[in-house]
Image (cartoon, coloured by chain):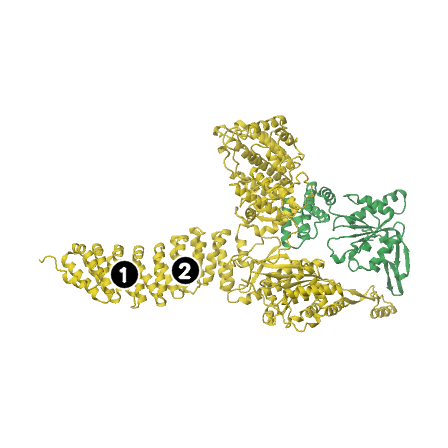
Amino acid sequence: MTSAPDHSHVIAELEKHPAALLSAYEEAKDRVTSAIGPVSALKWAEEGVQLANLGARSWEAATEYYKASPLVVEIIGLPQFERWLESGAGLVDESPVVASSFFRASPSVLNTLAPRHIAGWAMLGSSLSKGTWKSSSLAARFFDISNDLVENVTFHELQLFVSLVQTLSNRSYDLASEALVLGQRVLPSVGEREELISLATVLAETSWREVRGSFEAAARVSLSVDRKLRRRYFSLTERLARSGMANVSAFMIESAASLARLPQEQQVVVLERAEELADISSEAVGAFLKTAPTVLERISTSQLDDWYQRGQEFLKENPDGGVAYFKLESQRAEQLLEALSSSIELDRVRGLLGMYANALAGTEVQLQSVSELAHKNIGWVSMELATTDGKNVFLPEMVDQRETKAENFSWLKVVTTHQVGHIEFNSFDFNFNGEAARFEDLRRRVADGIGAKPSATDVSSFFDMFPERALAADVFSVVEDARVDANLLQRYKGLKEHYYSVQEETLKARSPIHEMPAQKAMVELLIRLSLHQSENAQVPSQYVQQAQEIAALLRQVQDPLATVEDTAEATLRIYHLISQVPNEDVPPDEWEEADLSETEFSEPDAEAIVQNFQRQVEEGEEGEGGEEYESPEDVEYRGDFKPEMVQLLSKMKGQQGDSDDDSQEMAEGLTQEEIEQMLRDSSEVDFGDDAEVQQVASNMMKEAGSDAPDNPSGQGYNSLPHQDEDGGPLEPSEPRSFVYDEWDFRANDYRPRWCVVQERTAVAGETAFFQDTLQQYSGLMDQIRRQFESIRPETYRKHKRLPDGEDFDFDAAIEALIDLRGKVSPDDRIYWRRNKDERDVAVAFLLDMSASTAEAVEEGSRDGEWNAPGDPVAYTAWLRARRGETSRRPYKRIIDVEKESMVLLMTALEAIGDRYGVYGFSGFGRENVEFYVIKEIEEAFTDKAKRRLDKVAPLHATRMGPAIRHAAAKLAKTDAKTKFLFVISDGRPQDRGYSREGVEKEYAVQDTRMALMEARQSNITPFCLTVDRNGHDYLRTMAGDLGYEVLPDIMELPRRLPQLYKKITL
Amino acid sequence: MTEQTYQRHSIEEYVVDSEPFYLPVADEIDIFEAAYAERVPILLKGPTGTGKTRFVEYMSWRVNQDRVKTGNPLSSLVTVACHEDLTASDLVGRYLLEPDGTRWIDGPLTRAVKHGGICYLDEVIEARKDTTVLIHPLADHRRLLHIEKLGEVIEAHPNFLMVISYNPGYQNALKDLKHSTRQRFVAIEFDFPPRDLEGPIIEHESGCNHETAQQLALLGEKIRNLIGQGLQEGASTRLLVYTGKLIERGIAPRRACEVAIVWGLTDDHEIQKSVMEVVTSIFE
């Protein structure tokens, strides 16, 4: 046995290289020796030398080799150690840099990597390295991050991942190394790595961007999709990717987000359907997954099948239509959904119930959704409870509590009727000093007794009297609701059945009264009585007497003669009783069933009530002890009743308008501070802090102001808010906005409620423009006027063989004479008469105000126009306009010619007395189709119209369809016998989102065509006139069989338009 | 031998001889009587089914009551429903051609003018414009009827009175009554009676029970709230009466309303549904 083998040759060799090598060797030597013995250690040392000598920079690899050795050997033991070394040596051959990384990474990687995979691991790295500098650094990178991967990923998955990276590296090493990092970050957090990598591999062939996207989206998928389903989800995605779906990552993000909205059992169903769809259309899968949660909100999982099946059939027939169906951008889809769904959406019944509400209330009541009211933040916060602000009724957006549609509708009808009932039976007209019909008036006495001062509204003056305001407000609400219900039931007998069933259900659903403290229980009892609880009323034994009195008081108010003032009187008395009940728990054995239906009403002792109030006010707000009073739960069908807020708001509105009404004592305005104080006092609103109060107060002031009459016009041509194109049906949110469907010719179906037309009154300018134009075209105007005047007599036609008329119809007369001679009774219709066929024409002109109309037109000789008019008045006008025009624009634009033509035509139309409206349209995007009223059809021709025409100016885009639909709707309202719609444009229809992939131009043209056809069907004759020389190509499609004209020279328009009009309308 | 089962009158001899049911809403009876005493022509305006025709019948009966006592000849009621083909000669009269010549026959207006009675031209603006030529001289101080074809002028009988009616609602603006015509008449406005009056009217006319009549009157009121908001005209009292009759004959109230009111009012499906909701709220 020799002693420790001599390492001097090793040292000598190592000394030839930079010192780091030797020191690495020396640091490791002892630990290695002790681990594997001196003999093997020498071999170990020599191997290092060999490595170092392999090439110019291989010493670096050798250094890492030495550094890693002690740890590695301790982890894997000697035999494996050799295999490790072999793998390393192989790598050094390829690239010392790669090998360095390999050695460096080894100690930590080998902690987790099974020794049998060592060689494989090295191979993976080496497979990435192709001898180039970039490939080496990729491989090195791989080893650097291997630890993170190996810790979380199986070796098989690692292999797949590397092969993905390799594929990417064929394209770009940057991408590949980015992928490595991404994998390091994402793979550990994803469960279905194999599937993800496999998907990414498919994507790698087409787009790196998608690979990255899919990796990033995968993390979201893990969060949203149920664990058991993820595998299927990924393989579905892969299938879609294979079938060539673009934008896979977006698909993943969207579908993950929408699946996240579904519980697991629905996810399965949806995913199954999506898998079926994948065979037909990948686009439909995306659409379906995205809309499924919305659909499932409205129909059950089993109904989804029906809906899906229909869509699938449809998809096979017409791919575009099918996709639109699943996107819910199709009327068919909506209709079927509606038919299947048992829920009632407010939008669908808004018209129906709105008119119903109008009929009952006798005033114009608008139905809106409660969330709209809540968003206004003017004191109403509930997103579900129906309510009213005294003018409009606010209802939940969706009703889905009952089994069937009919039941849900009945429920909503009851809810609506109750809210309208508050309007019909004047809940908000409470007058503090008004006389009650069924009670002696005590309000004044109590107020005087406690020295209460009047507040800004009658309701707050009333509530101000009560030390426990919340209790008083609750009692008032219940009593008033009961009064309204009683009145409604008395008047509307047909409602009884539904009303009672709603009340009965409400009763059943209420929390047990035994668990309530006594005071709250008394209010609860009041609610139950108001819901017609007829038997088994549970009352604390101690307060049976009070309960009987309360029941009798309530019955007084349920008399049809009772008014809201009676409600107030009853409130006073009931409050008097309940406020003396301490809010303490009542032991279970101290309840009894009481018969409350018998007690006769008798006026309580007024003096006692006044004294009780005085005493309570002196004692302060502390009641009779016990817990603090807390309101019982809401009665859902009665919603949210806020008389104080309604009176305040309507008073504020009154202030804004004319102050000549009869609110003399309140004539001085309310300041923001006063309103805030009232809000703080009111128990109808809960506030977090003062900032909130201020916010609500200022919102209320805005709300009150915005209602001031006569301000819809003059909005001006502001720049447009830009909104996203995606999304479903739109709602008209502002007054004078209207929603129209849009025709999707590829889907062969309408996109429901797709465009919002905002109607505005055009801004008024000067009348000089009008006069000026007439002056400018005076010759032409005379001619047109003559032509038009000649239209009138032409409408007389001769009618023959009449029993009476202007003169004999000789033919008939001769025949009659012959009959007479022949002694036969002749026909006595022997006259003729000119019959004036009344010309009964209404026409709407629709002017294109798109940006392109700002284009300058070539003017021929306009010298005539430079001649100043002789008349001095006209001359001044001419001069002023001239100056104005030249200072602004030295040239004429298309729109100017359009306007001039309208001037001539309008003047001519006045001569023949046709009714006509002039409108302009433009807009940007489907949410914002602007429709400017220059003159309404029934509006008289005044300076106003002239002024508005002056300000017509180029704006944005040209979404013709909705503008035509809106103009047609206006025409449809007139009762003229003959109706025309003239569209005057300068180019093809176009707008943001007015298209469909692949058929951009066609889509807009087809929708416009459909709009024109719709007009045609409602007996309106449409006509398109364009000054676009290239107009023939699309006009043929758009209006081919309807009538159109392309005007090659725009300067011809002023002459041609009246001619055309005459030609068409005769 | 056939039995004559109908009553035949010459047009100028038709007299309202039993008292028609009429419930005054305001002072229209006094106004009419005063105008009648002075032979001032009367214009009744108001929507269809508000009792204009019934009012004329009633007044025609009423002005005869004194004559019945005094034994004076009764005043007749000549009603002409105007339509768009009604010409002046339809009112005045015309020559009939007969095998052996021509024969003149008087039109209804001429008969009323000669005989003395109330001539009621219902929906007068529906008639052709040439009728105004006749109406004007009859409706002012002259009280003359020109018969152009005969070259005659007839002074109206002292008992002659012209009453015309028109409905400002549904005619369009072009077909409005001319001012020169309007200003020859005393105008009495008719509108739907208030609910508490309409109930008894329905009850009386249809014979239905009190509660049904009240409900029908309520329905009428509610439907009329929709005029201008989708409905051009409200449900007339006449329709409500018909409905009452159907209900009295055993038709279920909701169904009776549907056929007699809802479907008659409008063809718009949406509005029909809304009105039906009102119906189902009121009737069980």
Image disc number at residue A213: 2
Query: Percent from the top left, x then y, of residue B193?
Result: 73, 45
Query: Percent from the top left, x then y, of residue A800?
Result: 80, 67
Q: The chain drawn yellow is chain what?
A: A
A292 vs B253, left or right, is left
Q: Residues within 10 Å of mark 2 (few under 14, many from 20)?
A: some
| Spatial CA span between label 1 and label 2 | 29 Å
Query: Percent from the top left, x then y, of residue A932?
Result: 63, 59
Query: Chain B's colour?
Result: green
A874 vs A440, left or right, is right
Residue at mark 1 shares a chain with residue at mark 2: yes
Asked where in the image residue A599 lies, by quadrant, the reply is top right
| Quadrant into which the C terminus of chain B falls | top right
Query: Percent from the top left, x then y, of residue A499?
Result: 59, 42
Asked where in the image residue B22 lies, by quadrant, the reply is top right
Reading the image, the residue beneath label 1 is: A101
Say what amino acid the circle numbered 2 marks.
Gly
In terms of sequence position, does the residue under pointer 1 or pointer 2 come before the other?
1
Image disc number at residue B111: none
For the view shown, which residue lies furthest in the left direction? A1
